[in-house]
Amino acid sequence: MNVNVKIVFGLLGGLALFLFGMNLMSESLKKAAGTRIKTIMSVLGRNPLLGVLVGAFSTAILQSSSATTVMVIGFVSAGVMTLPVAIAIIFGANIGTTITAQIIAFKLSNYIYVFIFIGFLISFIVKNQKWKNIGITIFAFGLLFLGIETMGGVMKPLAKSAVFIQMMKEVSGIPFLGVLTGTLMTVIVQSSSATIAVLQNFASQDIGDGITSVIGLGGAIPILLGDNIGTTITAILASVGQSKNAKRSAIAHSLFNISGALIFIWIIPFFARFVQIISPKGIDVEVISRQIANAHTIFNVAMTIIWIPLLKVMVKIVTSLVKDDEPKKNLPKNDIENLLNYRLLNEPESALLLIQSKVEKVLNFAILTKENVSENKIEDEQEFFDEVLFVQRESEKLMNYITALIATNNLNDEQAVLCEDLIIKLHKAEKKLNKAVKKGVK
């Protein structure tokens, strides 16, 4: 096989292993700790400062800022969390996601297969579901590092290429080009953790002298800034068709990282020097992975410190960009289909929070409608039938959503019982509406 083809497929294969390991680890951690994190979010995430801490903690545990953001959107959509607190938690999630880069900076290549074997053994032998999830998490952690090791192996000949070294020098000399490169990488891969891992691995390659990094910290920082912007574009795309507060949260995420890039791009030499001073000392290629991780952490902590006092300003900006519709007076004027967030199906806690209040509204409307018919309080028959038909359609949409949620097989026993209860309530509402219609026709 051609050397260039080997390099391309080696990078793609390593990246696939990394992404698979990252996603598997995140899913397993959610199953093991998701309910507790949901409780922590709902109880502690009640003011912006605590929100930052909750966001950082949740993302550090789940190893996925996307999972935290989706949970937050679910809380906001369900009306149990305010937009300012949601934005603060997203700020914290930006800090929490830097833990991944810090973990990657550790040299764990000698223990990769130990993690894979132990994780497989626990998940294969143990019957307890909680310990199975822990075993899968350890297994996925090993896969993640195997992907990094694979990418590093194929990058070595690439880093020695004179053409590639020259290209990297040009990127390093033009910060805007580095930011654009990092943004495009993350938009394509859809994971800032993955692109930062690639950046750390690539920067650890030498130019042939065993000492000097092929790109250097000064060249890596603009790409790092671009990685942060790229992941917010993913959030924007994910919010298309979702609730207004979901869109506002995604826009706040974007403004956070774009404003940071606009500030830090002008101080890259000073920033790089500061990171080098506080980071471990040693040969360039041996310490640069840690330096990149530290730069990532410092960037997000600094931007959080800047934005938290300006949280009200951020809320005003995103609210002005995504304006509210005219207020709705009653249930029939609300289109439930536009409020249901199918992206939350893999986050059962958030999905159930989103639909519980809507099911209650449907049931309450049915009870009130039946009472009004019994007491002959219907003034306009055509309006009455239009409203009932509309609510019946909305009830069907809710039923389809609950069915889709059950079909994911991600529910625990408590969540399955709650879904069953919601279905019973929708059936009760349907019966009451049918009886009301029959009486109304008479």
Image (spheres, rainbow, N blue to C red):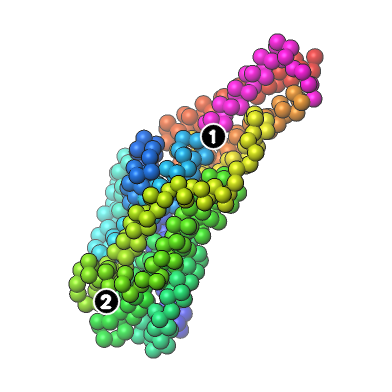
311 left or right of 345 in image: left
- Residue at the location (54% across, 53% down)? 238
Residue 225 drawn at (x, y percent): 41, 66
Q: Is residue 158 above or below residue 141?
A: below
When asked about the image quadrant of residue 201, the answer is bottom left
| Dominant secondary structure (helix, strand or loop) of the stretch shown in magenta | helix
Q: Is residue 47 above or below residue 234?
A: above
- Residue at the location (32% across, 77% down)? 216
Q: Amino acid at mark 1?
A: Ile
Q: Quadrant of the C terminus?
A: top right
When asked about the image quadrant of residue 44, the answer is top left
Residue that sits furthest to the top in the current view: 375
| Numbered label tally | 2
Residue 195, visible in the rendered structure: no
Q: Quadrant of the N terminus?
A: bottom left
| Circle number at residue 284 | none
Span shown in magenta:
354-382
- Residue at the location (51% across, 58% down)? 234
Q: Earlier in the sequence, mark 1 or mark 2?
A: 2
For mark 1, does the 10 Å Cα neighbourhood hold few (<14), some (14 to 19), or many (20 or more) residues? many
Residue 342 drawn at (x, y percent): 56, 45
- Tell me the residue that label 2 is attached to: 285
Is 233 covered by the magenta stretch? no
Residue 109 drawn at (x, y percent): 26, 67
208 left or right of 436 in image: left
Residue that sits furthest to the left in the current view: 281
- Give 402 or 199, whichever is nearer the viewer: 199
